Amino acid sequence: MLKIILPTIMLLPTALLSPPKFLWTNTTTYSLLIATLSLHWLAPTYYPHKIPSQWTGLDQISSPLAVLSCWLLPLMLMASQNHLQHDPTPRKQTFIITLITVQPLITLAFATTELTLFYIAFEATLIPTLILITRWGSQPERLSAGIYLLFYTLISSLPLLVTILHLYTQLGTLHLTMLKLTHPTLTTSWTDLLSGLALLTAFMVKAPLYGMHLWLPKAHVEAPIAGSMLLAALLLKLGGYGIMRITPLLSPLPDHLHYPFLTMALWGALMTSSICMRQTDLKSLIAYSSVSHMGLVIAASTILTPWSFSGAMILMISHGLTSSMLFCLANTNYERTHSRTLLLARGLQPLLPLMATWWLLANLTNMALPPTTNLMAELTIMVTLFNWSTPTIILTGTATLLTASYTLFMLLTTQRGPLPTHITSLQNSNTREHLLMALHILPLLLLILKPELISGAPL
């Protein structure tokens, strides 16, 4: 564990002491090395925890997410180079340091086996994200987006802290390995029901559940590209991971606890997909599509079957890479046309033919075409929900249909059709952007060859 976290912390002096000419090169190369090194976490094991130390340990659920969080730092650095081109060096260093600070915190949140440390890391990731959005966002509305993000997260996670302390007084331990051995305590009285609700709500807001999702489109639209990638690929997964960690402690879940969450998640997948159908703003469209995909994850992780857990796990990883790639593509359009509106940046295929290839790949992945892990995950989740209750197939089926239609709508609007008259020439796409897209899509295409690495099932 430390051999990843310590080098990541040592990235901070690297960013501060690098000469301005080599600033991006050094930090990106170094973080890519760390990302490559973190791949050994995926190695199968017969023990419940790999690399156990006193407070941290990775099992099958957390190791893919920890690897994903290491993998995204170099990608965020590569994506941010262009819009920080003309900034003075100290400002670039501050930006890079903010990005680097997030990574050990998120890795710690995924790898911890103790609930208090999990809570601390869970809340600490909020601060760098807030700095990213409110300092480097592109419009004055970024302040209101930051306030939304802060207050939604804080109001929902104060009950979480109280409940964690309440659990500690009841059980005398907060170690996840120990909690597995104790009897599920939160099942009978009203107090227990409310504490279960408090435990779940914090993660539902972070995940986001439909109805508590209003901070997400705001934050995504106002964030710089690195902030968007961070939010979509990692912070949303913190919510899903929290649900998958907490629900077994409440098992069996009382009916009046998980029915509302499940119906809101599935209904939300439907509603946000139909909101996507009539979005004018590209980043907002991708943000809403994240809500609908995470709705499936929430629905799967509340019913607590092994299939649903592995489906939720695979969907979280593949959605992290897919939506991050879509945000990068939207950003390349934004850097060239300086507009997020779909109608002002349409028909770009003749001008940027190679980018159109990446657009096609990313959109096909987003609508879960075979042979992607997204398809495997969505099928697993649908089958397990169908097995649990037959009518859910109506909701999930309609959601899939709508997902395919808004994804195709996005692809056709941005790539096809007549070129708007105000675009005469665009800056060419460069190697950095192609490498960035390749590093997003290659893991996705390779993971289908060995999906048990990320399926969360004990091998």
Image: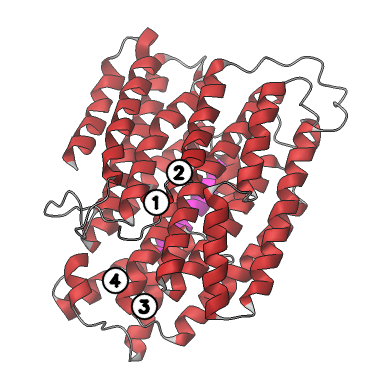
Residue 344 position in % (x across, y down): 79, 32
Q: Picture quarter containing residue 223? A: top right
Q: Which residue is mark 4?
A: 162
Q: Which residue is mark 2?
A: 447
In the image, what residue occupies the spot 50% across and 32% down? 136
Q: Earlier in the sequence, mark 3 or mark 4?
A: 4
Depth check, front residue: 217 or 184: 184
Residue lying furthest front: 449
Q: Earlier in the sequence, mark 3 or mark 1?
A: 3
Whether residue 304 is visible here, answered yes or no, is yes
Disc 2 and disc 4: Cα gap in Å?
Answer: 39 Å
Residue type at tag 4: Val
Whether residue 175 is visible here, answered yes or no, is no
**For the residues bearing labels 2 and 1, Cβ distance under 8 angstroms:** yes
Depth check, front residue: 356 or 458: 458
Residue type at tag 3: Gly
Which type of secondary structure does the marked residue at label 2 adopt?
helix
Residue 72 position in % (x across, y down): 42, 36
Numbered label attached to residue 196 = 3
Q: Which residue is mark 1?
A: 454
**For the residues bearing labels 2 and 4, Cβ distance under 8 angstroms:** no
**For the residues bearing labels 3 and 2, Cβ distance under 8 angstroms:** no
Point out the frontmost of discs 3 and 1.
Answer: 1
Q: Earlier in the sequence, mark 3 or mark 2?
A: 3
Residue 317, above or below 200: above
Point out the frontmost of discs 4 and 1.
Answer: 1
Disc 3 and disc 2: Cα gap in Å?
Answer: 35 Å
In the image, what residue occupies the spot 41% across and 86% down? 254
